[in-house]
Image (cartoon, rainbow, N blue to C red):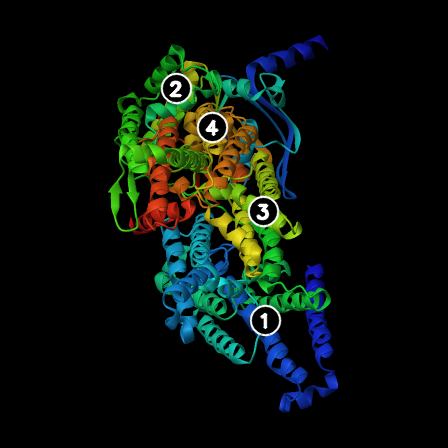
Amino acid sequence: MFEALKATAVDEINNAFGSKNVGLVIDGKPILREVNLLFPAGEVVALVGHNGSGKSSLLKILGRQIAPTHGTITFGGIDIEQYNSATFARSVAYLPQDISSGSDMTIRELVNCGRYPWHGALGRFSDLDRRMVQSAMAATHVEQFSERVVGTLSGGERQRAWIAMLIAQDARCLLLDEPTAALDIAHQVDVLSMVRRLAHEGGRSVVIVLHDINMAARFCDRIHALRGGRVVASGTPRQIVQPDTLNEIYGVPMNVVDAPGQICPLAYVE
Amino acid sequence: MRVAWLVSGGSVLTATALFFLVATQQLPLSDWPRAWSEARTINEIILVYGMLPRAAVAILAGAALGLSGALLQQLLRNPIADPSTLGISAGAQLAIVIATLFYPDVVDGSRTSVALFGAGVAAAIVFALGWRASFEPVTMIVSGLLVGVTSAAVSAALTLAQGEYLMSLVTWNGGSLSQQDWAVTNALSVELFVASALTALLIRPLLLLGLGDSSARSLGVNLKGVRLGVATIATMLAGVVAANVGLISFVGLAAAAFVRGCGVRRGWAIISLSPLAGGIFLWLCDGLVQAVAGVTGETFPTGSITALVGGPILLWLLPKVRTLSVSAQSNRPAVRVPLSKGIMVFFALLPIIVAFAYFLANTGQGWVFLSLSDAADLAPLRWPRLIAAAGAGGLLALTGAILQRLTGNPMASPEVIGVSGGAGLGFAAALSLVPTAGPYTLVIGAATGGFCAMVAVLAFALRQNMPAGKLLLTGIAVSSLSSSVLAVLMAAGDQRAWQILAWIGGTASAATPATAIFLALLAVSVLGLAMTMIRWLTLFPLGIPTAKSLGVPVGVSRALILALCGLATGAASVLVGPLSFVGLIAPHIAIRAGFITARDHLVASFLLGSIIMAFADFGSRTLTFPYELPLGLFAAMVGAPYLVWLVGRR
């Protein structure tokens, strides 16, 4: 009994997010069903699955963008509904998939926006805020174009600038919705290795929606896979990148091949 | 779905029954064949040359509008497109008013061509404005509203200036279907036949447009040609109806919505059934008008009924509009101008405005500079107008800037909150319900209407997942309902029409020292309050998800912002009427001048708006001396070239 309680308490401290029986129904259509997942603190966790598997919806639920129809989400052991909006925003930062807006701001102005949860609608923009913005831009290597207008940046630079805003938000947890969708392979690697570094060196938890299973395996500590709104697999990259598991996730026959110098095998479609 | 079929069956039966009810009162059914072959008595003549053609015109005009609406909706992939919501009908009306005033000999005999010309110009402007946003639904409707409201205001002002001559014309505008012979029937049937034949030719490529531009192009569709062709057919239909019958709004909207409500999905079926639905709808409305006229002796133009039915349908359709976020691709200058420079320019311009306002006068023969003592004598007359106009301009420009940031739509202007539209509706209700309405009753009516409209829009704003585009459409629905009801009431043609005309025009001469000081204080306090919302207005352009994840209370902050805008617009529209071009233009110019951050943008727009309105007041007072142009109208005339320039810029 006591052991069980202790185990839960440890669970809650070690996990950023936990979902219990989460379900989502939109217009009578079930999007997510009985999702029970843990997102350990300090890890980069990937959400993968086919189109319409519900991975983006799950990320939106974690970020309180939409409310689940059933079940609860906890963050740091507390139901996320109990946080007020400022406290939640200080703890969890969310990057939407569409970042085409805000294109006439400078990078610095964009990153300044990340300080809103700390100074609020009327508070002064303090020296601390200024320092946090500076170090966020340094951590994402965008300080050299801090005075340029966002609309003139390339896709990869723009993605880094938005992540800088999330870093300035100083949240323990980052939720990223397909940050690499529109990027070429070099920029994908650039953004993902930066995300991995920010998590492991900065002690942040990251949940990231990704399309490419090999990218997820290469850069993430853990993979949760969804299919048709249900969790079909969950584990380390080595556990997930197996022919049978991949087949179950994507519904097409897949196989793996060992790549020299890589921890994890590579997946390919047969 | 079954309900919809029942309703359509019921409508046909009711329309037929109403027609026979009224017609058999005129002449027993047994006498009809004789009357048809040779009408002798007055009753027979009324039946054959009045009632039968009237029914035919109702059906044909309704069918033409139904087809026009269905074509525009398919073309623009927009369920609320219609000749009235796109400003096409209002353009036709304006052309006829202008021609009647200045070229009366042209109108005689070629009224149709004049109306077609006006409809074509209006459609061209609206389509050109929507072009760069790839005909995004909200942008199209906002542009249509701008063109429509402006045309209506210009027509109103011209009518006001020319007095009694035009009252009969205004009556025509209301959409009265009464006929003296079969000429209109013949004209409409020829037109409908030609349009149907052309539609049949274009139907296949038109349906392919539904796949999206790039897919249609890769299938070999000539996008420009099809667009031009279909838009021409739709405009022609609306123009001919406007020329022959007058302003009948929302029929196309209602017809196509009804056909879809019956469960019809396929494009060609909607296009071919909508004329049928439109014909029945207008016939039914006309039957109701005649039945009411038979019982009470009060005749309304049929257009009033369609507007009253169509407005709520428009609101009901809003959730179905697919809004796209228009990402304004910025080719804006990277150069930013510090706000202090803008403020310096403002203070540099102040003495010029004061000099203009106090010392420059038009005597009717020429311009003169007044002596100091003359200027001092006139000062008590001048300063309230100047202050009030500047205050109203600042308020409208500030509102426009706030709304453009809040919704991310560069075409958003103060009309779209619906406050002035609601005020217009309240004004109209007070006029028609209280026969002896004095000025205070009217002001109370207008205030109540504006308040109700604002509450409706705020209720939408509080729903967090409501996209900003739909927020805009709610206000637009109120505004276009209001402008059609006002147009129809004017068409009643009695004393009330003058009051409505004066309301639409807006005038600064109504400003007293008290109202001027009130407006100025309000303007400054609204600017101050807006400064407390700067952070929200910085975050909203990043998109609702981002604003939300940063902890902005989306519903509450939107409601607060809109409440402030409603207050500002309401106060300003008392002075300048429902036209608020300055609210569209000033924020654009401010951004292009390099005032980009939220704070700089709001302050610069405010200052610019007050300058523009102060100059507009000077112009409206002096240009046509000794007559005075309505202030709102003059500002619109200054704004129209800007709109054209916006169209021309690629």
Give the labeled residue for mark 3. Answer: B427
Pick whichever, B277 or B480, lies toward us. Answer: B480
Badge number at residue B58: 1
Foreground label between 2 and 3:
3
Dot placed on the residue nearer the N-terminal end, 3 or 4 = 3
- Disc 1, disc 4: CB below 8 Å? no
Dot placed on the residue nearer the N-terminal end, 1 or 4 = 1
Q: Chain of mark 2?
A: A
- Disc 2, disc 3: CB below 8 Å? no
Q: In the rendered view, would you say B631 is above or below B69?
A: above
Q: Are marks 4 and 2 on the same chain?
A: no
Badge number at residue B526: 4
Q: Secondary structure at mark 1?
A: helix
Give the labeled residue for mark 2. Answer: A197
> CA gap, disc 1 to disc 3?
30 Å
Q: Quadrant of the N terminus of chain B?
A: bottom right
Rendered location of residue B188, percent (x, y) = 51, 75
Q: Secondary structure at mark 3?
A: helix
> CA gap, disc 4 to disc 2?
47 Å
Horizontal side of residue B373 vs B245, given as left or right: left
> CA gap, disc 1 to disc 4?
49 Å
Q: Callout 3 environment at 10 Å: few (<14), some (14 to 19), or many (20+)?
A: many
